[in-house]
Amino acid sequence: MLSKHDRPVTTTQTDSPQPNQYRLPPLVLAWGPVLLLWTLLLLLNPVGYIGGGSDDGRYLEAAQCVVDHAGWCVPETHWAARWPVVLPLAGAIALLGETRLAVGLASAPWAIAAILLLTTLVYRWKGRLAALLAGGVLVLTPVFTLRSLSPSADLPELTFLLGGWLAAQQRRPLLSGLLFGLAIATRETAAVALVTLPMAWLLWRPRPARLPVGMVGLALPLLVEGLVHAATAGDALLRVRLALGHTGIPSSELATGVDHRVPLFNMELVRHWRPATDIHVHWLLDPLLNLLASPLCGIVLVAALGLVTIRGRESYALVKLLALGSAAIALLLIFVLAIDPKPRMFLVVIAAAAAIVGIDCAERLCAHQRLLPMVLLVLIAVKGVAVVADQPNILMAEQVAARWITTSRPALTTDANTKSHFALVPEARVLAVGDGVPRMVLEVGACNAAAGESRDVRAPDRAWVAGICKTGFFLTRRERLSLCLYR
């Protein structure tokens, strides 16, 4: 049975507009400031596409293959098999060319949808202030905003999961199941998020007859996908085979380079993922400690964990559900699926943490307990803005590379990594991959002494960012990014 704190928000008579007055709906008043904050953060540092071995480069290659084959390209990697990511990106490229505009337009709607869905969910649970704060905390979490203009499975997966939970709360089982199925089609790891459904069942008590309808919706996109793969590749389970073989692809994030065994319950795989923040205590603790310490998400996770701990048994049933569900998802991702425990893989956990922070801080502010929520929110805001502003991007490198390629005689060569970084630079498409000279490469750190010309292509350090760096808490000094020309 729901407590008074967990009942859905309803509009009272005092919320109705007076005659001849127009008021924006309360939910829109929560959406607007959050979307504005997200836009300002993007303008501060529009990182977007990175390439060079990152997943966004893999999705771009898969989308270009779809375009080249007039609508369908049989996937050869697990990235290419994620059609909810690849097909919209392919459509944007087909219309606008392989440009940053096309990539951004295919990626940003997922972020916008995730913002709207999270704020809507929290609004239905706890009202406008909680929704506003939860949405603000989400966009101030750097890993969310920094991926907003880049092709990835992270934001589409989060969007479908949030949409599925919203539809479930609205008693729309077919739509809810369909969205959960699309989340799994986007990335297989989304399946672990379904562990929260039994917990939610205890809280909201849906009718048992709705469960089969939801299962039909869940199975539908996966069944259609299997039929397409059977018709085009002769393998209905192609997606599963590619997913289970992903650790056989060489990776710099895996200490052993590759692992050809099945990833499920593979503790050797868990042991050998490279920690994101280089914290080494014990391999069972390292994934969690590195997440909590990560500049891309750590402060939000620590804040949520701290607030739940302070409340203890007094936490609302909803907050307990969010906390327990997030913990279950994180543990399943790390120790059952044995995925690389990087912050981007935990966006659903981060969204739940943002909701916890928003709900708890809103409750405290309404109770005139202002000190703790204000301190937390200011720390989250300063950390988020500073990390986003300090994140390197390759926009300046693209400009320099285009000029060097255009003016060089004879033509430049490069390596595959650099060519991937410059995949959205039209001039770079003529570059040959090889060891000949003249040769242009993008390197972390300073260029080799043999370089005939070099450019530090980081965006210049802002004075206020440098000041924050000196605190040693918010940022660490970032490495130089150099474009090197060897003659």
Image (cartoon, rainbow, N blue to C red):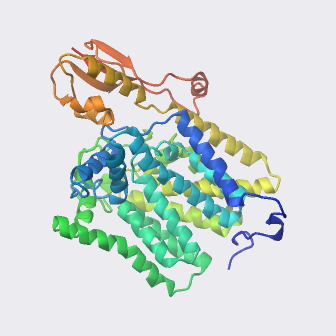
The answer to which image quadrant residue 103 occupies is top left
* Residue furthest out toward the bottom: 209
Q: Number of labelled discs?
A: 0
Task: Residue 93 in the image: state x and y as whole percent.
Answer: 33, 46
In the displayed structure, 249 sits above or below 9; it is above
Whether residue 97 sits left or right of residue 430 in the image: it is right
Residue 265 picture quarter: bottom left
Point 63% across, 57% down: residue: 356
Q: Residue at x 65, y 50 (%)?
A: 32
Q: Can residue 342 be seen in this view?
A: no
* Quarter of the image that includes the C terminus: top left
* Residue 400, visible in the rendered structure: yes
Residue 282: x %, y % from top left? 42, 47
User: Does residue 132 sit above or below 19 in this rendering?
Assistant: above
Q: In which quarter of the image is the N terminus?
A: bottom right
Within the image, what quadrant is residue 452 found in? top left
Q: Does 262 appear above or below 372?
A: below
The image shows residue 105 at horizontal and vertical percentages of 44, 47
**In screen coordinates, is 278 left or right of 123?**
left
